[in-house]
Amino acid sequence: MAMTVAEIVKELLDAHEKGRDIQLNKLKTKLSSKYGLPMQPRLVDIIAGVPQQYKKILLPKLRAKPVRTASGIAVVAVMCKPHRCPHIAMTGNICVYCPGGPDSDFEYSTQSYTGYEVSDTKLYLVYYPRPCHVVCCMNKQILLLLDGCL
C-alpha cells in the first residue's frame, strides 16, 4: 500500500509541476492493479503520504467534495408522528414487519421504524413538526412534494 501511495503522490506532484489535471480515481485504479492490491488506497492514506512541504499545494486538490448523490436529486425522508398499527383493531396484534408505534418498545417511533434512526430521534425531541423537519433538511434545494402535504 505504501508504494502505491508514494507513486500516487509522485504522479500528483508531476502533474502539478506540468500544470495538468489528473484523474485521481483512474490513477488509484491503475496503480492498485499494478501492485495487486485488493482495494484502492483511501483518500486519507494519500493525504497522510504527502510530504509536509507539498501539503499546501496538494491538499486543496485532495479534499473530499461533499457529494450526496450522483444524479443531483436527494431524497429527504420526513417522519410522521407515531400512530397505532391499523391492524390492531382487526387482528388484535401488530404486524410482524411493523416493529414501531406507540404500543411497542419503541413507543416514540413511527410504525415501520425502530426508533433508533437519526431523523426519528431528532424529531422525537421536538415533537415531530413536519414542516420544520423539511426546512431543516433542505438548504437551497427545490422541494418536489409527492403524495402529501406539509
Image: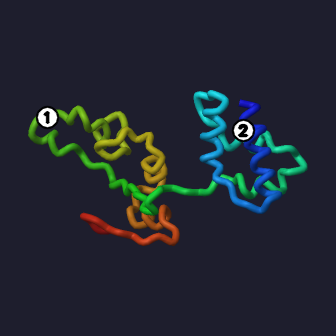
Q: Where does residue 17 sit, x and y in percent of width and height?
A: 82, 57
Q: Residue furthest right?
A: 53
Q: Which residue is identified by label 2?
A: 45
- Which mark lies nearer to you, 1 or 2? 2
**52 lies above or below 92:** below
Inspect this view and state whether residue 133 appears: no
Label 1 crowd bin: few (<14), some (14–19), many (20+), radius 10 Å: few
Label 2 crowd bin: few (<14), some (14–19), many (20+), radius 10 Å: few
Determine which of the numbered discs, if any, sits on residue 127 in the image. none
Residue 45 figure quarter:
top right
Residue drawn at the location 80% of the way across and 51% of the way down: 13
Inspect this view and state whether residue 147 appears: yes
Q: Where does residue 150 sit, x and y in percent of width and height?
A: 33, 68
**60 lies above or below 113:** below
Given residues 46 and 112, the one toward you in this image is 46
Given residues 88 and 69, the one toward you in this image is 69
Mark earlier in primary sequence (1, 2): 2
Residue drawn at the location 33% of the way across and 55% of the way down: 80
Q: Residue furthest left?
A: 90
Please identify the quadrant where the N terminus is shown. top right
What's the residue type where badge 2 is placed?
Asp
Given residues 14 and 45, the one toward you in this image is 14
Q: Where does residue 140 sit, x and y in percent of width and height?
A: 51, 72
On the picture, is 79 further left or further right than 60?
left
